[in-house]
Image (cartoon, rainbow, N blue to C red):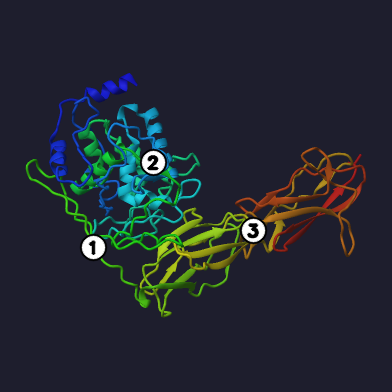
Amino acid sequence: MAAQFGRRLRRGATTTAVAAVAVAALSASQGPGAVLASDGGGGDQRTAGSAPSDDSAATGNSPYYTDLPPLVTPNKPGTSTNLPITGSAESGIPASVLAAYKKAQQSIASSDAACRLPWQLLAAIGKVESGQARGGRVDANGTTFSPILGPVLNGQGFAMIKDTDNGAYDGDSTHDRAVGPMQFIPSTWATWGQDGNDDGRKDPNNIYDAALAAGHYLCAGSRDLALAADLDRAVLSYNHSNEYLRTVRSWFDYYKRGTHEVPDGTGVVPPPLDGGSDPSPDPGTSPSPTPPAKPDPDPEPSKPGGGSTDPKPPTPPATQPPKPSQTLAGMENAGTGALTATAGDAFAERIKVRAKNSLGGPLAKVSVTFTIAGDTDTRFEGGKSAVTLTTGSDGTVTAPVLQAGETTGEFTVRAIATGRSLPAVAYTATVTARQADAIARTDDKALTAAPGAEFADAVEVKATYKGAIASGVAVTATMITDGETPAENDKGPYFKDADGNTVRTLTELKTDADGTLLLPKIYADDTAGRYKLRLTTEGGATVVIELTVEAPAA
């Protein structure tokens, strides 16, 4: 690590403009003693290195919560931050969320110790972006119970960011939206996403994954976050706004003065952002008032001497009951037909659901999550088992194409209004085995063997369905007796299993990509005669092949 520290500290001259601006801006802040020119006591200031540009902010400069910390800090400066589970709700951080921040700090301390990332900075950003994952509403793995989505970034009051993920993360294939408790836009997540809980997935809606990704993003460009200038630039790269910097800095200072752990789900729940589609609170919670409009972000940090003051805490407007035409009353099937497909094929029918308001009419802009359930390897197009989309002006939304896997049988697809307690709409889908309506040998060689020997020529067959190649079709091979009702023969030619035992029926055979099947070696016992081998496909196609066991001519 010595080399790494050296690399960082040799980077050149100091630039204090950003810090000076922030100090002036925060002089009128309501944050509890928030200051920007804090470098851990060393007084060492330097220029931040190359990092994510302001034009590629992690959040796409999307809206955030502008509430400031209480004037009364949770503890006096300089005292321990390991406080018991008591105190004000504002200073409490839900257990899983707090654990994720501290784990991210430890992980980055091991991989990039020179960054000196404080977990309180992650907590400050998490508070401003999502209210600590909506008050810690996460499951045992740290994943939010429903996706946290920012407003559509369509240029109407917000930035214009066209879709970069085909709706994979945000359910919008036209424009991007910030996703998850740390509010990454999909294009940024594609670059910076992490697996913070070691489950093999990088999920922006998982607080462990999101916190670790945020830590790496803030540490980019060889930053040392113990230096005020680098910390300011890191925060501004996350959301390029002076107001954002002031708000994050206030919470950062607040959390450094002390905090404590509260149970998951008991933290302060922020109200939905204007223009966003943050799901409704969990059943049983009281709705929060509509938040004040967020000021437009500054395109650049203010110049020294320009002056800036924070507005007084705005008073939320009175909550108005929603109109019946704007109230979601339920979901219904919007005419989806039978859902059947052959293994490996795409379902011809697509699932369509309609959102209804209290008057029975269509309701637009409802977030709907489609989830595949049951013993199946069928997935939506793109390999996903769950997708979230939004209803259109006619109240309907259509799920992506279902791609059948190899597991046959029935499974269920459920459509629910994301984050609501309304009943789901369930659809039963069926995957049938691949079939063939014809099967035949690929040659006509006579198949003979001497008693006690093996057949020299292999048996190869080809299956078709409606004249086309039938790949992956199940085939059963059986040595049969003569007669009107053939049965498995107990003498004559046979196969061998993996242990070398004699078997006269083989199952779990399948044709290859060309529709062909090459049978294993066939052996003859000591009984001479003419015998029959029957091959039957899934779908009922059958071919009977003659085998002869006779001594060679003298």
- CA–CA distance in space, label 1 to label 3: 47 Å
Residue 392's quadrant in the figure? bottom left
Badge 3 or badge 2: first in the primary sequence: 2
Decide if residue 127 is on the left or right side of residue 342. Answer: left
- CA–CA distance in space, label 2 to label 1: 39 Å
Residue type at numbered disc 2: His
Residue 217 seen in the figure: no
Decide if residue 313 is on the left or right side of residue 209. Answer: left
Residue type at numbered disc 1: Gln
User: Residue pushed farthest top?
Assistant: 2
Residue 224's quadrant in the figure? top left
Q: Nearer the viewer, residue 430 or 417?
A: 417
- CA–CA distance in space, label 3 to label 2: 51 Å
Disc on res. 260: 2
Q: For mark 3, what is the residue?
A: 408
* Quadrant showing the N terminus: top left
Disc on res. 156: 1
Q: Is residue 446 positioned above or below 253 on the image?
A: below
